[in-house]
């Protein structure tokens, strides 16, 4: 599938701030069959945009606004070709990835409840079946409910609430998979819904030795297909937020995000 994506983030302040530093992870990955055909980042105020590649292979754009202002707008426009079947056939993980994607994190801790949740879906000797079983258990056991959690909610808290959004479902999946010895990584991106309201999305890759990464979405109980656009991968949400920054000043910040996906 070929998609056009427009993602606008606007920060406003109730009084002028003196300077700000902002970084974004909004360029679709060239990864496992997905190709980013074009990408343009526009900032207002207009500033020089620099970039670097983070330890997980994500391209990070960043810029500074060094004069007083009350508003920053960032619009990322991209065109991407997605793949109907996600395949990243690695025989083995590097030692660093094997460590990074099996350890607990602040968002995906190893609590007794998450350990028990993971054990309940364990299929001994079959990592792929375990991963699919965990995805189904999350989909069937939790309710999708906007506003029930916040961006800082952990997997343990969401599991206790038995509700949350895609970020929470992904963090529970990460913690449960890793607690059973499976390497798992967080994926940020988009899901095209054929004209319905678009938004950022999150799902999980689970590593199966000898087969490679399986890309699974516990929010929809589905494997990644051509409707999914991958933006960034990491250990949890903290590694891959679409926008992040700091500013100097006493102004209170408000955030507004708009995403539009169109099939071409």
Image (tube, rainbow, N blue to C red):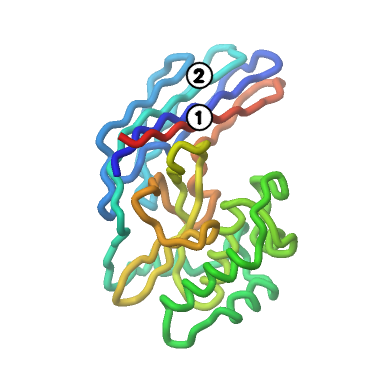
The dot on residue 142 is: none
Q: Position of residue 169 (x, y in %)?
A: 59, 58
The dot on residue 22 is: 1
Q: Position of residue 127 (x, y in %)?
A: 43, 78
Please name whichever residue, 153 or 252, is drawn nearer the observer in this view of the structure: 153
Which residue is found at the position 63% from the left and 75% from the top? 117
Please name whichever residue, 221 or 154, is drawn nearer the observer in this view of the structure: 221
Left/right of residue 177 with respect to residue 112 in the rendered view: left
User: Does label 1 or label 2 sit earlier along the sequence?
Assistant: 1
Assign the C terminus to one quadrant of the image: top left
Residue 48: which quarter of the image? top left
Q: Position of residue 143 (x, y in %)?
A: 67, 58
Binning the other alpha carbons within 10 Å of mark 2 as few (below 14), some (14 to 19) or many (20 upward) gives many
SS for dot 2: strand
Disc 1 to disc 2, how far (Cα)? 8 Å
Q: Position of residue 206 (x, y in %)?
A: 43, 67
Please name whichever residue, 154 or 98, is drawn nearer the observer in this view of the structure: 154
Check whether the beta carbons of the residues at disc 1 and disc 2 lie within 8 A of each other. Answer: yes
SS for dot 1: strand
Which residue bears the numbered disc 2?
65
Which residue is found at the position 30% from the left and 59% from the top? 85
4, above or below 218, in the image: above
Assign the N terminus to one quadrant of the image: top left
Left/right of residue 10 with respect to residue 154 in the rendered view: left
């Amino acid at each position: 599938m070929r998609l056009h994506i427009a993602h606008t983030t606007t920060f406003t302040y109730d009084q002028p701030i003196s300077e700000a530093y902002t970084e974004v992870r909004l360029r679709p990955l060239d990864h496992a069959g997905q190709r980013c055909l074009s990408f343009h980042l526009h900032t207002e105020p207009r500033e020089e945009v620099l970039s670097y590649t983070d330890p997980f292979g994500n391209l990070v754009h960043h810029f500074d606004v060094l004069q007083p202002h009350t508003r920053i707008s960032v619009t990322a426009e991209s065109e991407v070709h997605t793949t109907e079947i996600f395949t990243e056939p690695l025989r083995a993980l590097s030692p660093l990835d094997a460590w990074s994607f099996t350890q607990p994190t602040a968002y995906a801790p190893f609590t007794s409840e998450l350990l028990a949740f993971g054990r309940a879906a364990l299929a001994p000797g079959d990592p792929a079946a375990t991963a699919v079983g965990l995805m189904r258990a999350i989909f069937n056991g939790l309710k999708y409910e906007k506003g029930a959690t916040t961006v800082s909610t952990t997997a343990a808290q969401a599991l206790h609430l038995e509700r949350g959004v895609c970020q929470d479902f992904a963090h529970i999946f990460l913690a449960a998979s890793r607690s059973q010895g499976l390497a798992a990584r967080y994926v940020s991106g988009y899901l095209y819904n054929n004209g319905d309201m678009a938004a950022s999305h999150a799902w999980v890759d689970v590593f199966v030795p000898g087969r490679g990464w399986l890309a699974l979405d516990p929010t929809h109980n589905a494997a990644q297909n051509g409707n999914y656009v991958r933006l960034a991968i990491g250990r949890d949400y903290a590694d891959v937020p679409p926008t992040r920054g700091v500013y100097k000043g006493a102004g209170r910040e408000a955030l507004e995000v708009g995403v539009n996906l169109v099939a071409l």
